[in-house]
């Protein structure tokens, strides 16, 4: 696609990553939960011990799309995979195939880097546009699985169990 480059984020892109994540949180109505910082992205998103990978869609110097992902492993499949934590395309860049291109780049990168053989993500029940998008790509949206989260004081308390 002329004018839009899909590429792996580099440390100098940390502010762009945070800005796109903040836009995603705003879009989802979750801005009060947003806590990510440039320092956190720099610390956890780059280097030998990184926990997060980021793929950017850049139009010139502007970030217009983002996929944040990391390795996972399926004990049922017996192979590594890739978990996409966040996928976001700015409203002005939608309808140009960037979501599909970002996911394709993530799939290629994860397959090459750690042998990923599948991709998984969560989609909000109320986000019918996203659900349709993922189904069009061939994703299966099972009715029998629900995410469960433990954080904050409950997470800390669990760590105290002897």
Image (cartoon, helix red, strand yellow):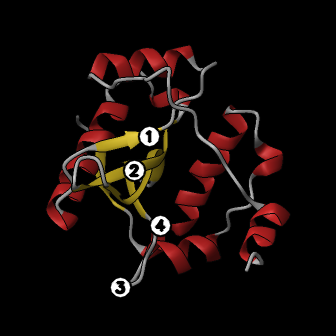
Instruction: Quadrant for residue 43, please give it.
Output: bottom right
Please name the residue shown 53% across and 68% down the image: 14
Spatial CA span between label 1 and label 2: 6 Å
Instruction: Quadrant for residue 111, please give it.
Output: bottom left
Discs 1, 3 touching: Cβ within 8 Å: no
Discs 4, 1 touching: Cβ within 8 Å: no
Spatial CA span between label 1 and label 3: 24 Å
Q: Is residue 138 left or right of residue 15?
A: left
Which element carries disc 3, helix, strand or loop? Answer: loop
Please state the horizontal and vertical placement of residue 76, each as a whole percent of the image: 28, 47
Q: Which residue bears the numbered disc 2?
A: 83
Spatial CA span between label 3 and label 4: 17 Å
Q: Nearer the viewer, mark 3 or mark 2?
A: 2
Total numbered circles: 4
Please state the horizontal and vertical placement of residue 131, each as a whole percent of the image: 47, 19
Instruction: Give the residue at the far front of this rendering.
Output: 162
Q: Is residue 135 left or right of residue 89?
A: left
Q: Which residue bears the numbered disc 3?
A: 48
For marks 2 and 4 on the same chain, the one whose residue lies earlier in the sequence: 4
Q: Evaluate whether residue 15 shows in this view.
A: yes
Q: Is residue 56 left or right of residue 91?
A: left
For marks 3 and 2 on the same chain, the one whose residue lies earlier in the sequence: 3
Q: Which residue bears the numbered disc 4?
A: 13
Which element carries disc 2, helix, strand or loop? Answer: strand
Discs 1, 2 touching: Cβ within 8 Å: yes
Spatial CA span between label 2 and label 4: 21 Å
Q: Which residue bears the numbered disc 1?
A: 121
**Mark 4 neighbour class, 10 Å CA radius: few under 14, some 14 to 19, many 20 or more:** some
Q: Evaluate whether residue 59 shows in this view.
A: no
For marks 1 and 3 on the same chain, the one whose residue lies earlier in the sequence: 3
Q: Quadrant of the N terminus?
A: top left
């Amino acid at each position: 696609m002329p004018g839009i480059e899909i590429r792996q984020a580099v440390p100098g892109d940390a502010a762009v990553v945070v800005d796109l994540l903040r836009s995603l949180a705003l879009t989802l109505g979750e801005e009060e939960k947003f806590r990510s910082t440039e320092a956190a992205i720099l610390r956890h998103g780059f280097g030998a011990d990184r926990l997060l990978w980021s793929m950017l869609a850049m139009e010139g110097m502007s970030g217009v799309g983002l996929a944040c992902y990391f390795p996972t492993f399926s004990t049922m499949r017996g192979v590594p995979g890739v978990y996409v934590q966040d996928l976001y395309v700015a409203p002005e860049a939608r309808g140009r195939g960037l979501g599909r291109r970002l996911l394709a780049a993530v799939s290629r990168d994860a397959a090459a880097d750690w042998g990923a053989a599948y991709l998984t993500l969560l989609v909000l029940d109320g986000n019918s546009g996203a659900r349709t998008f993922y189904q069009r790509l061939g994703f299966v949206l099972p009715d029998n699985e629900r995410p469960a989260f433990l954080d904050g004081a409950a997470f800390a308390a669990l760590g105290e169990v002897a």
